[in-house]
Image: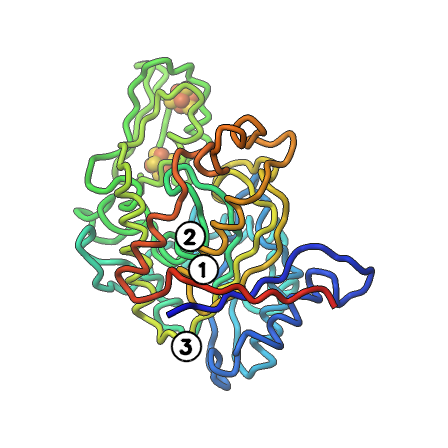
Amino acid sequence: MTATVYHMDARAKRWSHVDSLPGKLERLLAEKANLKSVVKKGEPVAVKMHFGSQGAYMIIRPALVRRVVDAVRAAGGKPFVCDTVRIKGVDYLDVAAANGITPQSVNAPVVLADGLFGMDYVKVEAGPLMPFVPVASAIHDAPAMVVLTHCKGHVQAGYAGAVKNLAMGCVSGTVREKDLRGKVGRGGMHTMHKGQIRWTGEGCTFCNECVEACPLEALTCDEGKKAIVIDAQKCWSCCRCARICPTGAMKAPDVGEKFQDALSECAKGVLSTFEKERLLFLNFLLDIQPECDCMPAADVPVVQDMGILMSQDPCAVDLATCDLIEAADPLPGSAYTAEHRKAGLSAWEALHGRTGRRHVELLADFTGYEKAYEVVKLGNS
Ligand code: SF4
Ligand code: SF4
């Protein structure tokens, strides 16, 4: 079978609303989204997005989120915009507001799907890597979901799109079962049973950047002992400290491809809580920057904006996104360079050493979602 992926490019070739990206999104949703099957009258619809971080501001713009919310509402649904807890929940809602995501801007409640403390989840079977997947309860219990994904790179996955948004973004960071912390949930995917984050001391300049970046205040600098101390009870293995450490003194376990294997397992668990026709995926190929939206900063985009892809198939929409990004030339001045291109490397191969397709293709193998797709282009008016 071949899945259909709709594509609206980002160019505005005429100075009219219908050729603006918000105008094109309105058309895409009205003409091709099949919202009457996704949405049932009076039922809640989760509109999943990433709220970003204080410095990673390149999230999906509220003007675009609002178009989706309004279309869901027009189809009879009751949308709520959600993400899961990345830093302390109360602080994360502040980050969302600072990045422009408020009930007023998006015209819907803005909620944390796994609760204010990130511990409201429902255990869903997946296997074989994790004993269970802690699916955020508001996502688990929602009868329908529209997944809005800002497409970009990711240090461990290579590429972060709809499948990663399902896997990382729809589950709790940690779990109540203390013996399973670091083994399931978002933290578990980062470390996959191979141990915890470690401070080696080697080359540490005591810059304190890791201490400041830790979302859970799990790190302290013991000035007497000249050491960075990790509170294992607080740490949920997000690996942010290791990724920002400028000297490599803070080390995350190398999980290799297991990270992507775990992503596909978690995504499968999340998808199992929905009927296929109650899901819709919109990939935003805008501000395609090198790293995840939960990092402390965003870098300039590596390739040009390419608009919006939409499908009811998360694997097809991601593989279509990968194909577009891999075919794109580098933007001058970005981390992806003309030399990388000349050497035959795509953006994610050059920056992260992998294409980022593995977790998407594995999910298709597990679930029957499609790797083959056909693109239907909806052009300018
Ligand atoms: S960020 Fe790295 S170098 Fe700086 S204090 Fe932490 S471990 Fe040391
Ligand atoms: S992995 Fe590092 S940043 Fe993340 S919670 Fe643990 S100590 Fe904090």
**Tag 2 residue:** 85
Q: Dot 3 lies on which element?
A: helix
**Tag 3 residue:** 277
- What quarter of the picture does the C terminus occupy? bottom right
Residue at 33%, 56% in the rendered image = 119
Q: Position of residue 5 (x, y in %)?
A: 51, 65
For disc 2, the neighbor class at 10 Å (few under 14, some 14 to 19, many from 20) is many
**Tag 1 residue:** 112
Residue at 60%, 46% in the rendered image = 287
Q: Amino acid at mark 1?
A: Leu
Taking the image as four quarters, which one is ligand 2 found in? top left
CB at mark 1 closer than 8 A to ligand 2?
Answer: no
Frontmost of labels 3 and 2 is 3
Residue at 40%, 45% in the rendered image = 356
The reply to whether dot 1 and dot 2 touch (C-beta < 8 Å) is yes
Q: Is residue 272 above or below residue 259?
A: below
Q: Position of residue 65 (x, y in %)?
A: 60, 63
Q: Position of residue 177 (x, y in %)?
A: 20, 52
Extreme residue in the right direction: 15
The reply to whether dot 3 and dot 2 touch (C-beta < 8 Å) is no
Q: Nearer the viewer, residue 117 or 204?
A: 204
Q: Nearer the viewer, residue 367 or 379?
A: 379
For disc 1, the neighbor class at 10 Å (few under 14, some 14 to 19, many from 20) is many
Q: Nearer the viewer, residue 208 or 101?
A: 101
Q: Is residue 31 above or below residue 351?
A: below
Q: Amino acid at mark 2?
A: Val
For disc 3, the neighbor class at 10 Å (few under 14, some 14 to 19, many from 20) is some
